[in-house]
Amino acid sequence: MKLKMKAKIASIHNKISITDEEGGLVYQVHSKVFSLHNVTYLTDGEGEEIAVITRKPVSMHDVHTIQLVDGTEIELRTELLHLTKDVLDIEALGWQLTGNLLQHDYQLTDDQGELLAQTHRKWLSLHDTYEVDVVDEERMDLIVAVLVALDKIMADRQLVAEASDDAARIHRQD
């Protein structure tokens, strides 16, 4: 199934609409930009909760936990020192993301190397939009939750990089 993830960038709440090819709402993502608990909610098109994604606030690694409504819990752990990686292992599932993660141009494969989904960023768009082709529709909720968590990880890293750039610029001006 082909999906489009479209983020509303200028908002006090981080919102992503995930639609099908005809524009029908399949999933929604909601999170507050300034939140002590850094919680993101993935809901279906009718607003029913699919998953809750949280970020561990203090850790030597960038840790996000995905908890599906069926009780399944998956931890995504990445090293903070890497700003980009061509490969991200999702050890809890045996899955792997390969490609250009920052540009949303990557493939998600399972422990057998079978393609689960692939993404591609749309460059000529007014919104931050990328397309997702979900090959394994039986695990679509989990796949989308993992991709949303990855999107959060990359957004967090971008904020850290921008803050670091701003601090360096201010330091040079002094």
Image: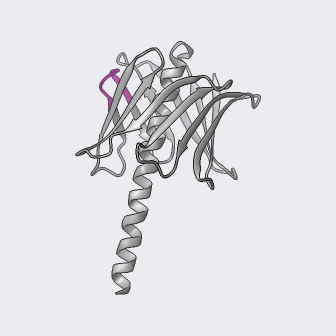
Q: Position of residue 20 (x, y in %)?
A: 69, 27
* Coloration of the structure image: one colour
Q: Residue furthest right?
A: 22
Q: Is residue 66 magenta?
A: no
Residue 120 percent location from the top left of the image? 57, 39
**In the figure, 167 relative to 133: above or below?**
below
| Spot occupied by residue 167 in the image (x, y as percentages of width and height) | 36, 72
Outermost front residue: 36
Q: Quadrant location of the C terminus?
A: bottom left
In-image side of 156 versus 138 (left or right)? left
Against 104, residue 9 (above or below) is below
Seen as rendered, the residue at the extreme bottom is: 174
Highlighted magenta segment, given as a residue range: 89-96
Q: Position of residue 117 (x, y in %)?
A: 51, 26
- Residue at left 54%, top 35%? 119
Disc tally is: 0
Residue 95 in the magenta stretch? The answer is: yes
Q: Is residue 157 above or below residue 52?
A: below
Q: Quadrant of residue 73?
A: top left
Q: Quadrant of the N terminus?
A: top right
> Which residue occupies the foreground of this view, 21 or 152?
152
Between 123 and 57, the one nearer to me in the picture: 57
Residue at 63%, 50% in the rendered image: 123
Left or right: where 20 falls relative to 43: right
Tell me the residue at 72%/29% (across/down): 21
